[in-house]
Amino acid sequence: MSFVPEGKVYMKSQWAILVVDDEDIMRDSMAAWLREDGYTVLTASTGREALELARQRDFALYFVDLKMPGGIDGIQTMVELKKIHPDPVVVIVTAYATVDTAIMAMKQGAYEYIVKPCNPEEISLLVERVIKVKNLQRENLILKKKLSRKYNFQDIISKNTRMQEIFQLVREVSSLRSTVLIQGESGTGKELIARAIHFSGDRCDKPFVCVSCGALAETLLESELFGHEKGSFTGAVGQKKGKFELAHEGTIFLDEIGDISTKLQMDLLRVLQERSFFRVGGSDEIQVDARVIAATNRDLLQAVAEGTFRDDLFYRLNVINIHIPPLRERREDIPLLTRNFIEEISHQIGKEIEDISEGALKILIDYDWPGNVRELENAIERAIVTSRTRALLDDAFSFLTNGKKEKKGLIIPPGMCLEELEREAITVTMQRTSGNVKEAAALLGIDRSTLYDKIKKYNLGR
């Protein structure tokens, strides 16, 4: 899952401000001041225009002139904004300052009441104060969600039967010391499973250390894993502890284990057998108690057969084997993952996206996702960034369908009538969505009531 890293600061441009004023000079001047401060600013000349823009997206702050033509003034605009968004931050701006209008504005829920001509410095400070509060609210919301599910296997969203079996296996092995080998295509969530094993076991309060074995050359990876002594090679200006030492009493996660060299395979085998190692250039044997979880997207049995991976190391690693199915084999998870990513990513980038159309969801379900869950997450982020509506529509995912090869026609068995074909299509689709009528209807391109009628007609169980 994707969460906002600790200490992340939202860019000003990710917050939008709406300036509503029928006076061109006032409206354009305030918009220019705010844009100079780095904010995204939209403008409207009437209350009705402002409401139309608000229906398309939420704004961090609304500057609304009190007196405007068109039958809807600033107070009425603010009242209508509250019907569109639950807690809009509205600043009423007026050239006609009276105690009565100030009291009326505040009673109706205005955040602040300012008088023309506006001071740019005061405007900047006011906006900065509002944005700071907005940032804190958003950070707190995401952190609460993160802390409530931190690295627990339940954080991996799936209703697929095979994934549920993996979750049960995670529960069973989480407190064991046995080595685990996680296999699966790139992007399936191997590190998430490794973290779930560690953080739901009795080592959860000890270090969880990740090493990407495919990202480093052999000499660098050796130093990364086992550390080195001062002067052991050029650039070794001091002693350095390796990842195995840092993972003592915890877990070390060796990602892309299939990419390590023959020499490092021997060194790793020794650590697994003896639970000890030597730093590069060192003579002192170091004892270590670290649970090893390894992951690969390669077929290690084939690598053993080809002689590129040691069979004794393979069997040492493969004590508990977890194979994660690719996303195309658990398409029923796509709607769940999609809605979760929409919620998280829209919070992260400061854009209010609340839903996805049935047509867009069908595009995602039909796509084969060679990059798996990671590719799905990236596709959702791209769609959110480029979307101009509060819901992701079909065209938000045109980049997935452009240049897509046409599927081959269905092969229909001889003698199968139209009703039999329809019954078979519904049966297969309902199995594919684990009985979820809404998702099945989206895949079939019909509404739910029609699907319910056909299920009843053909006497099909959900």
Image (cartoon, rainbow, N blue to C red):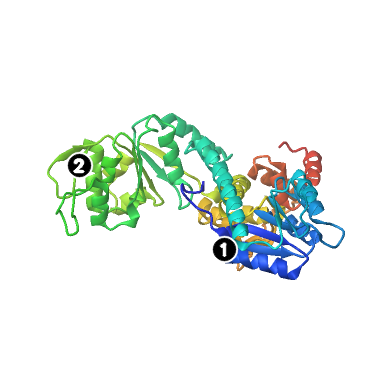
Residue sitting farthest toward the front:
98
- Please, what is the three-letter code of the amino acid marked with disc 2? Phe
Q: Which mark is residue 277?
A: 2
- Please, what is the three-letter code of the amino acid marked with disc 1? Gly
Q: Position of residue 86 (x, y in %)?
A: 72, 45
Report the side of 106 relative to 316 (left or right): right
Q: Residue at x 70, y 63 (%)?
A: 117
Q: Secondary structure at mark 2?
A: strand
Q: Residue at x 61, y 55 (%)?
A: 127
Q: Which mark is residue 1?
A: none
* Front position among marks 2 and 1: 1
Gap between marks 2 and 1 measured at Cα: 53 Å
Q: Position of residue 71 (x, y in %)?
A: 87, 59
Q: Position of residue 212 (x, y in %)?
A: 35, 51
* Mark 2 vs 1: CB contact within 8 A: no
Q: Secondary structure at mark 1?
A: loop
Residue 330 visible within the image: no
Residue of label 1: 38
